[in-house]
Image (cartoon, rainbow, N blue to C red):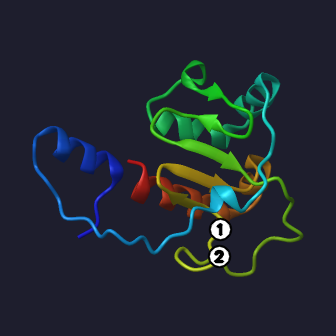
Amino acid sequence: MAITLRQFEHLTEMGIGLWQSRTSCYVDDTKQNSFLPLTPHSLENLAKHRLFSDVLLSLNLTIGEVKVQDDHLDVGLFNWYFLDKELDEEPKEVSIQEGALISCIKSKLISPRIETIAQSTKLKKQLWHTIANNLL
């Protein structure tokens, strides 16, 4: 049975040890991709997007709790990286497990730009699926 990082932390705090595989089947994508550089002005622009506001609302966060780093947003529970490339076209088939455009590995949410996600129902669905299964 898979559990989220949040559940794992709660169980660890209660003194309940869990077995974990020592080999990881995931690759840390943050070392292989280039990410969109962010500034405080970038955060102001993100706050104008309803999708971004909805994500913060679902996490019980306000815009004031989000910290801007050089290449990601520190959202508290996780770091959110935006890929610094535009998609040529809307993906024909977005797979949740293989070839996913949005992923979460080791509390690092990696996604296309919020503008790109907002224009694609498949990407929105994948974002919510990733957040629900990995971050909540």
Query: Toward which corner of the image does residue 41 lie, by quadrant?
Result: top right
| Rendered position, 28 above or below 38 | below
Residue at (10% x, 49% y) in the render: 16
Q: Do the residues labelled 2 and 1 touch (CB within 8 Å)?
A: yes
Query: Toward which corner of the image does residue 85 lie, by quadrant?
Result: bottom right
Q: 11 left or right of 131?
A: left
Tell me the amino acid under the disc marked 2: Val
**Where is residue 54 shown, x and y percent of the image?**
57, 39
Mark 1, Cα crowd under 10 Å, few <14 / some 14-19 / many 20+, is some
Q: 110 left or right of 104?
A: right
Residue at (77% x, 50% y) in the render: 35
**Where is residue 86 shown, x and y percent of the image?**
86, 60
Looking at this view, name the residue that lies furthest to the right.
Answer: 88
Give the structural element (helix, strand or loop) at label 1: helix
Q: Which mark is residue 99?
A: none
**Where is residue 65 shown, x and y percent of the image?**
54, 22
